[in-house]
Amino acid sequence: MTAEIQRRAWMSLLAKALEGRLLALWEGYGASPEFHWLRAPEIGATMVRGRLGGTGAPFNLGEMTLTRCALQLASGEVGHGYVQGRSKDKARIAALVDALMQTDQATAIQAAILTPLAAEMAEIKETRAAKAAATKVDFFTMVRGED
Amino acid sequence: MYVAVKGGERAIDNAHAWLAEERRGDPNVADLSIAQIREQLALAVNRVMAEGSLYDPDLAALAIKQARGDLIEAIFLIRAYRTTLPRFGATEPVETEAMSCDRRISATFKDAPGGQVLGPTFDYTHRLLDFALEAEGESPKVAQGAARREPTPHITEFLNKEGLIQTEEVSDEEPGDLTREPLELPSNRPLRLQALTRGDEGFVLSMAYSTQRGYARNHAFVGELRIGKVAVEMEIPELGFAIEVGEIELTECETVNQFQGSKTEPPQFTRGYGLVFGQSERKSISMALVDRALRWEELGEDNLGAPAQDEEFVLYHSDNIQATGFLEHIKLPHYVDFQSELELIRKLRREAMETTNPVQEAAE
């Protein structure tokens, strides 16, 4: 179960990552493991759903682009890539990272790719939240001279 | 007799080449990049994504460039592209409660938990042209405060806890999909919301405005308007669990409408709901107003005969691609059709002349 939660977390991170940053970090890691495709990268879409009133029954909001692939390392581990957007490179690297995270390279991959990626994405989110916070209205009531 | 007309290929090719040249404009002016459109015309990109019904900012920016800034043409390009994509599935419904809000305001509760967060808004600007933008310049330094990390609760939930607003019944019923099955009437609220969120902004705005002016009187308050990013989760069949497959920006609007009660419902507040891709505030508020007007029947209200209460009228006219397709086709060659019209009118005139003026004609 913990393994599933961890895998869920890294796959989610890879899906949302900026393509340029993932490619750069992957190149920095410098691995080129042997693999074969189980499913070559394929661009498609998924129907995004919302709920009536935010909490009620589901409705179809519109689609978003998605790219997926699956591969198997020469050592046997299977990696899946499901990433936002239309980049086949991003999907391939996401699947490679997913597969390598199941090998003894997990700690090295975590340190070289996933941790920096998570930190950068958290910082971007934090900065936006900080800018939003600065636009929060502080109401004050004028004291009317009625004493 | 049917006469096949051929020709025009050369003229069409030349017209398209000229279109490409005109699109580029003066070659001494720098070419516009997709990234520039995506970053600096973000609200146009958002509209194309919302009405094109496909969330992909780079594609929407490309469509805007190709369409020379004609947003309906750009939406058309996105709709056409969308049909070429295999569908991998559907996502879990997005959790707007968990949104990282750039903006979150309420017109009903001043002291709502989470506060009134203005975000990057046009509100309170003076709508004076800023000639400083003509010169290249740095944007001002943006102030930062203490970032909120906890989720921002929905304001209508406070009313819901007191039972003062109609509850949205939670269900996991599979919603119908307009892009898969043709629309049949009467429809239902999930289908109406799908049509409205991809509907033309101008049309939905005008319908909403008509309800404010008294056609299907519904005095709406913006209970809450929020803009920000939400994660999109999808079940991955080969894995057997759900992952976040992406993150999208959404605008959500919940309106609170007074309701006197009916034969079936007690007096309480009722809801209108808008949810749109991107930062699309006007569209989202409009959608919520039209959603509320279309709910007259389920709430046991009177049909006042207003256009915004007429599901058939709203749903069959909200899609700008259907509308422009039908509208613009009349400029394409109709030579044969028109030939028969001409002959008919000549015949009718001849007959009319003969019956009304037989003498005069003979005299000539």
Image (cartoon, coloured by chain):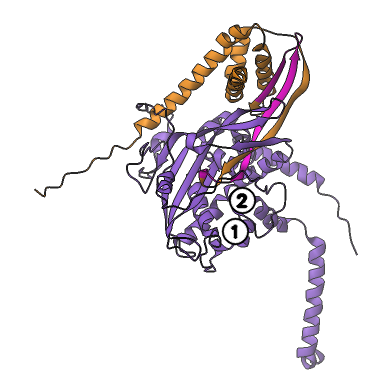
Query: In terms of secondary structure, where does tag 2 sit?
Result: helix
Task: Please give the count of numbered marks on the rendered protein.
Answer: 2
Tell me residue B256's x, y (percent). 43, 52
Q: Which residue is mark 1?
A: B314
> Furthest residue to the left?
A147
Tell me residue B338's x, y (percent). 78, 65
Q: Are marks 1 and 2 in contact (CB under 8 Å)?
A: yes
Whether the magenta-drawn stretch holds residue A73 is answered as yes
Q: Which chain is orange?
A: A
Q: Residue at x 63, y 61 (%)?
A: B312
Looking at this view, is B332 or A8 the one in front? Answer: A8
Looking at this view, is B323 or B19 the one in front? Answer: B323
* Quarter placement of the N terminus of chain A: top right
Label 1 vs 2, first from the N-terminus: 2
Kindly tell me whether residue B33 is visible in this rendering: no
Looking at this view, is B182 or A19 the one in front? Answer: B182
- Position of B154 with respect to B174 (left or right) is left
- Position of B245 with respect to B208 (left or right) is right
Q: Chain of mark 1?
A: B
Looking at this view, is B73 or B262 the one in front? Answer: B262
Kindly tell me whether residue B318 is visible in this rendering: yes
Query: In terms of secondary structure, where does tag 1 sit?
Result: helix
Q: Which chain is purple?
A: B
Q: Which residues are magenta?
A: A54-82
